[in-house]
Amino acid sequence: MTVETTKALEDEIVEHSKKNESFGAIFSSCTGAFKEAIDRAKIELPAGQLKHVLRHTFASHFMINGGNILTLQKVLGHQDLKTTMRYAHLSPEHLEAARILNPISALTVG
């Protein structure tokens, strides 16, 4: 999965990498710390699902923060939009649009 960033963030990452002599590795692995947190929370995941949980969390928060479903589809690499639609309900506009755009809202009483 690849996520676009701003130029300012890119510059900050490069500067951090130079300062900390990362030798090409921009980020250290967080898998160990994440695994420890999962263990402390007593969450049982099937083998190989640790990174999938992070991917799912990213997608959920992307939509919660107002992300576009088509952009998310591209970021996640889903071929079929139906696969990405599982995150649509997390969009803050999701239910508001249904309230405003449904045919019943156009009816008048009287």
Image: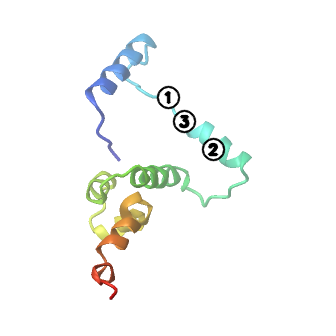
Q: Which mark is residue 35?
A: 2
Where is mark 1, residue-wise? 28
Does residue 47 appear to the left or right of 80 in the view shown?
right
Mark positioned earlier in the residue sequence (2 or 3): 3
**Could you tell me residue 9's position as x and y percent?**
34, 26
Which amino acid type is shown beneath numbered disc 1?
Ser
Report the Cα–Cα distance between label 1 and label 3. 6 Å
Q: Earlier in the sequence, mark 2 or mark 1?
A: 1
| Residue topped by disc 3 | 30
Q: CA distance from mark 2 to mark 1?
A: 14 Å
Colour theme:
rainbow
**Amino acid type for the residue under numbered disc 3:** Cys
> Is residue 46 depicted above or below 28 in this figure?
below
Q: Are marks 1 and 3 in contact (CB under 8 Å)?
A: yes
How far from the left and from the top, in percent, is residue 73? Answer: 30, 58
Image point 31% across, 20% down: which residue?
A: 11
Mark 1 secondary-structure assignment: loop
For image coordinates 41% across by 63% down, the residue present is 87
Q: Residue furthest top?
A: 19
The three-letter amino acid code for the residue at tag 2 is: Lys
